[in-house]
Amino acid sequence: MRTLLFALVLAWTATAARAADLSYDLMPRLIAPGTYIVEGRREHFSRDNGGNIVNTAFIVTETGVVVIDTGPSALYGRELRAAIGRVTPLPVVKVVNTHHHPDHFLGNQAFEDIGVSATAETADIIARDGQSLTENLYRLSGDWMRGTEPQVPTGRLEDGAEDIGGHRLRWLLLAGHTASDVALFDETTGVLFAADLVFKDRTPTTPDADIVAWLASLDVLEALPFRLLVSGHGSEAADAAPIAQTRAWLGWLDGTLSTAAAQGLSRTEAMQLPIPAGFSTLALAREEYQRSVVHLYPGLEAGALRHTVGRK
Amino acid sequence: MTRPLMLLVALLLALPARAQTVDPADPLASVMWETVREVVFPGATMVFDDHVQVFSPPVVEDTMNVPVSVRVDGLPDVEEIVLLVDHNPIFKALAFFPVQAAPAFETVIKVQEATPIRAAARTSDGVWHVGGLRVDAAGGGCTVASVAASGGDWDRLNEVSGTAWRRPDGGQRLRFQVVHPMDTGLVDGIPPFFIERLSIATPEGRELARLELFEPVSENPVFTIDLRGHAGAVVIAGADTDANQIAARIGVAPTLFGLMEASR
């Protein structure tokens, strides 16, 4: 019995030691005056990447730092805050969650003393689903998640512009990728932070998507006079190409699935349709396409099956 | 030693014992397969067979709604196809009897966790041919209450909506949905309540295909079936565990079933 207990303790210690070694090695990259991107990998959540598949960003203004999204775990949040501290001695003055997906808000614990802001819808969804979203990331990312708990944003974002430390920041309350998506246009530097309304060279994800609303949001973003575009996934761009790429994928997805449903294809048949070669630059296209069929096809096939043919 | 610790140790000791029962022939190397086999197919002759193909997305996000299709190619006289989920508390999801239909179907099921999903096809010689795949999943599909049980739209219970598409081979593609909570009985205070049988027949009463359903089939399930040699109207009849009747008629298929290329 003693041997078994010893083995248990040994196993526990080994796991703890491994967890202590984990680090995202976050490297903020200067992309515009005072503006940094922390770029994640164009992958799905895994125990290898620890959920570092997302872009976070921050703006160092004259009076303090504005942080856009907090990452996929408490560890990420702490490392992000430490990385900011290496760039500037100024305090963090504002932290936002652009939407409720777990890779964008699970670092909130590291900014508890400052408080995190989001829209009322996003805060409500995190309050309702935060626990299950977090549990799922524990399953996908493993030890990297240690100590991570969902923290509901307490501050509210309003649509419109505000001045922080010499930057004129315009908050755009949009929707489509989820029920509530916030974009930020820094009118001072010309940098547009589009969050997950725009994906670059990474297939858009649709678990909470409304394609029509999403396309309308892309029109709003494209009309802004931005000089640099930071998307939620993929590197920054100096033009609107990532917007066009996201629009093209969503348009193809919606058209293909609508046609498939109208022609009687089953869900798994729709999942196996070919993806045009034009999308070959998008990472995870087949996987995300299959996920999108699960998300979107039930709604589309309801139209095709609309004939009520019998009641009890 | 404290009681919880003793329990933990007992559990740890029990794990390898279960793992020893993996059938070496099982391509999915499932620790549960021997149990599934003993419970669902006692005494039956079973072979693993690639002619039985199961398709489902490899990663399941919504454990309450997992689309699964089964297709048997190159086996004669398939009389019954059983859909199984190794790691569900209830293994058997449904049995499909393709009387005059292709030995293929799609439906939507609940899974409790990452699991093999299998189809066993019985040919007329009595042998079960087994194929399958493994899906990864977050937990919880079978022990979550249905939307209906949480206060859904009971006025539409057993309502059927569906459409048929003509097939070039003279048959038809049938897709239909039945409004039903399909409660498993595994949630405290919500008894099992699910559709038990569905039959598809000609208006004259000649049976074309039949389904026996069990708890793991999803709420408001959608079924896809290909009928052979019958392009006319069909009648769907069935009943749930409370003997509520299901009765519907799907008219003659107006449009052609087709792949994407057909419309361009």
Image: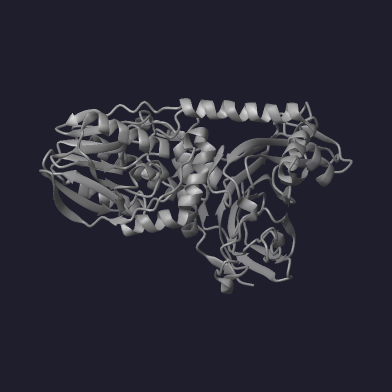
On the picture, is A13 further left or further right than A178? Answer: right
Which residue is at a point 58% across and 47% down the rendered structure image?
Answer: B67
- Position of the C terminus of chain B by quadrant: top left
Residue A123 in percent (x, y) is at 36, 56
Whether residue B97 is visible here, answered yes or no, is no
Viewer-side residue, B95 vs A112: A112
Does A14 sit above or below residue A163?
A: above
Residue A56 in percent (x, y) is at 31, 37
Residue B161 in percent (x, y) is at 56, 63
Residue most extreme to the bottom: B155
On the picture, is B2 further left or further right than A262? Answer: right
On the picture, is A6 further left or further right than A264? Answer: right
Residue B187 in percent (x, y) is at 66, 60
Viewer-side residue, A118 vs B154: A118
Which residue is at a point 70% across and 71% down the rendered structure image?
Answer: B244
Viewer-side residue, A270 vs B173: A270
On the picture, is A283 further left or further right than B140? Answer: left
Does B192 sit above or below residue A96?
A: below
Q: Quadrant of residue B32?
A: top right
Q: Quadrant of residue B135?
A: top right
Viewer-side residue, B211 vs A177: A177
